[in-house]
Image (cartoon, helix red, strand yellow):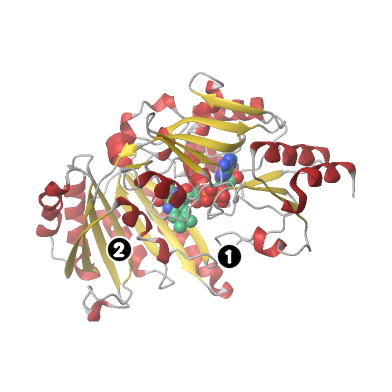
């Protein structure tokens, strides 16, 4: 054993996992089975000092470093062959400071860790819609979810962070301390340091009124037009989402629709529950759904509603784009992509954004595309490795066919795939990209931290 490995082992003990060691294959596994990569060493960290020790080791052996938060990045950014994997999955503690209205969440938290700790107090930090997603990657790239129109993105709720820099130093950052780093951490997509603690602003949450309509594809065209007319005029308390996917067998959906592709429109009301029915009903009165379901649920329930449809260990490929409007032709393209779906588990999701996302001044954070009207995501999910090419191609093609209606050249950074660096220039725009590159140069001049797949 060389000196630097001995030093790391003296600190982390058997939390240093080498290829061939018991548990290595289990520990290196991430959510998307497409990415079967083999790190040269895994450092299972419990603290910022452990992270610093792992970075020190990586520098001494001249290896690149990847970081795993929740391991949900679809492109597998948490893993690279032969690199040192800093695994934060044991760092999931959350403490709530009720007086300050803040949560302190360790860098390896899943969204559900934060929700469990905060919703007990009627509070939440706006975040994504699948509770087993990691807070780290989601927040560093932006963080869309049910509360985004009402309160903004997850990255808009980062008040401060503890960060281990590539040289092993541990710093605190906020709007006054290392402001350039703080700017980049909010939406820049990661790679500027290892965040070991996020301090998050919390918001009040109560019961949620949710109404969902299901439409056969024959009625989807008029329903999508009605969705557009409705969604674009709503207050920020109302968040609407749509999905085109195959109907699974569920009691509340008529049996003849099971196994067929359909459009799901959902309106979630985050204002006073008593107003929910009046607020959500007009969307469904204006259309002809096959069935409508109305539910009143807690915010915590809402946050895990989609968990089962995105299980660990399947094969996934997701691409997204921002869409400028939902006029007739993009609607045709949505429907064309839905008809072309290659797997019963795949899905097209879209939602109208704006609201509080767009209230934050553009220069305040690295997050680009605040004024984007719609986000559109084509998520391919399948299990048979032989069907990789057709599913990947479907996802790519589903986004490309919307090319004439892309908002800017951009896409959501957390869904960028195995694409050339030029794609990131498109995502951030040239001047923002240059500013991010300058922050990277200052805090990680030797590009130790990899944040691209
Ligand atoms: C099922 C599913 C649902 C999703 N839903 C949403 C959604 O509702 N809204 C939304 O906005 N996005 C959503 N996403 C996208 C999600 O934001 C990204 O996949 C994100 O990268 C996941 O973060 P993670 O920590 O789990 O990923 P990881 O793969 O662990 O990490 C992703 C990247 O972030 C870096 N990173 C992670 N944690 C840290 C840290 N603490 N410090 C420094 N770097 C870190 C990693 O190095 C890597 O480069 C979803 C993804 C999936 C798979």
| Front residue of this view, candidates 361 and 419 | 361
Q: Between marks 1 and 2, how big is the CA–CA gap?
A: 28 Å
Query: Residue lying farthest right?
Result: 2
| Residue 19 in view here | yes
Sequence order check, earlier mark of 1 and 2: 1
Q: Residues within 10 Å of mark 1 (few under 14, many from 20)?
A: some
Dot 1: element: loop
| Front residue of this view, candidates 384 and 270 | 270
Residue at 55% of width from left, 61% of height from top? 32
Residue at 13% of width from left, 61% of height from top? 287
**Callout 2: CB less than 8 Å from ligand 1:** no
Dot 2: element: helix
> Horizontal and vertical percent for residue 247?
31, 72
Q: Is 19 positioned to the left or the right of 235 in the image?
A: right
345 to 171, vertically: above or below: below
Q: Which label sits on residue 33? A: 1
Q: Nearer the viewer, mark 1 or mark 2?
A: 1
| Front residue of this view, candidates 81 and 391 | 81
Q: Is 188 positioned to the left or the right of 335 in the image?
A: right
438 to 196, vertically: above or below: above
Asked which quadrant contains residue 258, the reply is bottom left
Q: Which label sits on residue 335? A: 2
Q: Are marks 1 and 2 in contact (CB under 8 Å)?
A: no
> Horizontal and vertical percent for residue 190?
56, 39
């Amino acid at each position: 054993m060389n000196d630097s490995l001995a030093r790391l082992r003296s600190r982390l003990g058997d939390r240093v996992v080498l290829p061939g060691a018991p548990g290595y294959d289990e520990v290196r596994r991430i959510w998307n089975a497409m990415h079967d990569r083999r790190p040269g060493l895994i450092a299972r960290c419990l603290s910022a000092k452990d992270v610093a020790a792992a970075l020190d080791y990586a520098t001494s052996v001249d290896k690149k470093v990847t970081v795993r938060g929740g391991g949900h990045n679809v492109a597998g950014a948490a893993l690279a062959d032969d690199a040192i994997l800093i695994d934060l999955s044991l760092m999931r503690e959350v403490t709530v400071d009720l007086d300050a209205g803040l949560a302190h969440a360790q860098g390896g938290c899943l969204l559900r860790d934060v929700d469990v700790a905060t919703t007990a107090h009627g509070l939440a930090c706006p975040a994504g819609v699948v509770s087993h997603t990691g807070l780290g990657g989601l927040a560093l790239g932006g963080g869309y979810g049910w509360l985004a129109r009402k309160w903004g993105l997850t990255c808009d709720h980062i008040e401060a962070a503890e960060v281990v820099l590539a040289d092993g130093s541990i710093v605190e950052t906020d709007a006054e301390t290392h402001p350039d780093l703080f700017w980049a951490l909010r939406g820049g997509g990661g790679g500027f340091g290892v965040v070991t603690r996020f301090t998050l602003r919390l918001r009040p949450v109560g019961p949620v009124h949710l109404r969902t309509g299901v439409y056969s594809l024959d009625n989807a065209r008029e329903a999508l037009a009605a969705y557009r007319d409705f969604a674009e005029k709503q207050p920020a308390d109302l968040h609407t989402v749509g999905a085109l996917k195959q109907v699974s067998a569920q009691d509340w959906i008529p049996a003849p629709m099971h196994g067929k592709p359909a459009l799901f429109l959902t309106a979630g009301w985050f204002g006073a529950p008593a107003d929910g029915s009046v607020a959500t009903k007009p969307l469904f009165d204006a259309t002809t759904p096959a069935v409508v379901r109305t539910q009143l649920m807690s915010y915590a329930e809402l946050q895990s509603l989609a968990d089962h449809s995105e299980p660990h260990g399947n094969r996934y490929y997701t691409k997204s784009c921002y869409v400028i409007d939902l006029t007739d032709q993009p609607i045709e393209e949505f429907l064309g992509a839905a008809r072309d779906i290659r797997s019963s588990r795949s899905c097209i999701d879209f939602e109208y954004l704006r609201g509080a996302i767009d209230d934050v001044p553009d220069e305040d954070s690295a997050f680009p595309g605040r004024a984007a009207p719609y986000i559109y995501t084509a998520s391919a999910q399948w299990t048979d490795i032989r069907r990789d090419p057709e599913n990947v191609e479907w996802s790519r093609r589903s986004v490309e066919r919307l090319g004439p209606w892309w908002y800017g050249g951009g896409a959501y950074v957390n869904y960028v795939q195995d694409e050339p660096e030029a794609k990131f220039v498109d995502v951030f725009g040239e001047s923002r990209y240059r500013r991010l590159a300058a922050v990277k140069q200052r805090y990680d001049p030797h590009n130790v931290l990899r944040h691209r797949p």
